[in-house]
Image (cartoon, rainbow, N blue to C red):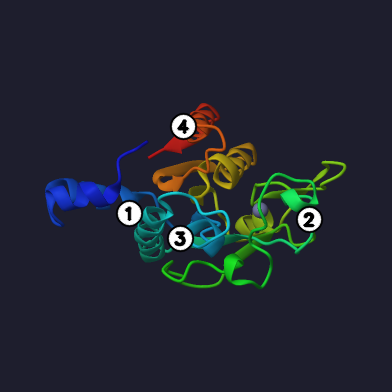
């Protein structure tokens, strides 16, 4: 597991040289042709009372808020994705899938976490029609597995976006799938490792996902 930014911050104080360097590096990540993709920071994943709570999601919100601020000040686009399911879908264990019921549309669990900084309202909702899949760029038919693009790629192209920075929940599912699709679509892609946490149905899934993203050409920062 990677270091937690909160711990490092408090050790060296808010204005040490390392903090300055980190801030500069963060600022260099963003410009008007970059989009920050904030993946699925929703109550069901990010709140301890959520139905699919990801351990340590609180620190993801802290990192996300700092990155969102840096992105906005550099004129970068910020896109918030939301897992967004009908009440009945083969994505859920009760309907033949593997997951507890989560992020049902227009419920508390599907809302962005209230502590997440929402600067404006570019949102992509995934799974709206009962589709399956984890990437913010594509959805899959639950039966045939045929994939279809979401609006995200065309939304980014329309804004002249060439680079994407990804963080959020969860490292081994939606973050992984979104980052891998971004690379495949030709975006220069960066993962903020400390800004993501894994579900880990199997121990080690988080690190395996990070390694896979790195091997696919995702820059890990
Ligand atoms: Zn889901």
Disc 3: CA contacts within 10 A as few (<14), some (14-19) or many (>=20): many
Position above or below: 18 against 107: above
Q: How many marks?
A: 4
Read off the residue under disc 4. 207
Q: Earlier in the sequence, mark 4 or mark 3?
A: 3
Viewer-nearest of discs 4 and 3: 4
User: For this rendering, which residue is in front, 31 or 14?
Assistant: 14
Is there CB contact under 8 Å for labels 2 and 4?
no
- Alpha-carbon span between mark 2 and mark 4: 29 Å
Which quadrant of the view contains residue 115? Answer: bottom left
Read off the residue under disc 3. 76
Position above or below: 179 against 158: above
Q: Earlier in the sequence, mark 1 or mark 2?
A: 1
Read off the residue under disc 1. 27
Q: Earlier in the sequence, mark 1 or mark 4?
A: 1
Q: Picture coordinates of residue 100 (x, y %)?
A: 66, 52
- Alpha-carbon span between mark 1 and mark 2: 41 Å
Image disc number at residue 89: 2
Ligand 1 closer than 8 Å to label 4 CB? no
Viewer-nearest of discs 2 and 3: 2
The residue positioned 57% from the left and 69% from the top of the image is 111
Viewer-nearest of discs 1 and 4: 4
Q: Picture coordinates of residue 181 (x, y %)?
A: 63, 41
Image disc number at residue 108: none
The residue positioned 64% from the left and 62% from the top of the image is 103
> For this view, does 120 lie left or right of residue 71?
right
- Alpha-carbon span between mark 1 and mark 4: 26 Å
């Amino acid at each position: 597991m990677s270091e937690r930014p909160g711990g490092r911050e408090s050790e060296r104080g808010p204005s040490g040289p390392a903090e300055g360097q980190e801030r500069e590096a963060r600022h260099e990540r963003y410009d008007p042709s970059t989009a920050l993709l904030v993946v699925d920071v929703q109550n069901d994943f990010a709140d301890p009372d959520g139905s699919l709570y990801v351990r340590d999601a609180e620190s993801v919100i802290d990192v996300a808020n700092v990155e969102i601020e840096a992105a906005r000040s550099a004129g970068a686009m910020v896109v918030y994705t939301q897992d967004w399911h009908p009440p009945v879908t083969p994505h859920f264990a009760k309907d033949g899938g593997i997951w507890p019921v989560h992020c049902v549309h227009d419920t508390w669990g599907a809302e962005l976490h209230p502590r997440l900084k929402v600067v404006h309202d570019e949102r992509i909702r995934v799974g709206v029609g009962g589709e399956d899949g984890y990437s913010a760029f594509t959805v899959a038919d639950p039966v045939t597995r045929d994939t279809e693009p979401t609006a995200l790629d065309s939304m980014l192209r329309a804004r002249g976006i060439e680079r994407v920075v990804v963080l959020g929940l969860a490292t081994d599912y939606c973050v992984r799938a979104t980052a891998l699709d971004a690379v495949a679509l030709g975006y220069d892609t960066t993962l903020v490792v400390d800004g993501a946490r894994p579900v880990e149905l199997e121990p080690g899934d988080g690190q395996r996902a990070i390694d896979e993203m790195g091997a696919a050409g995702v820059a890990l920062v």
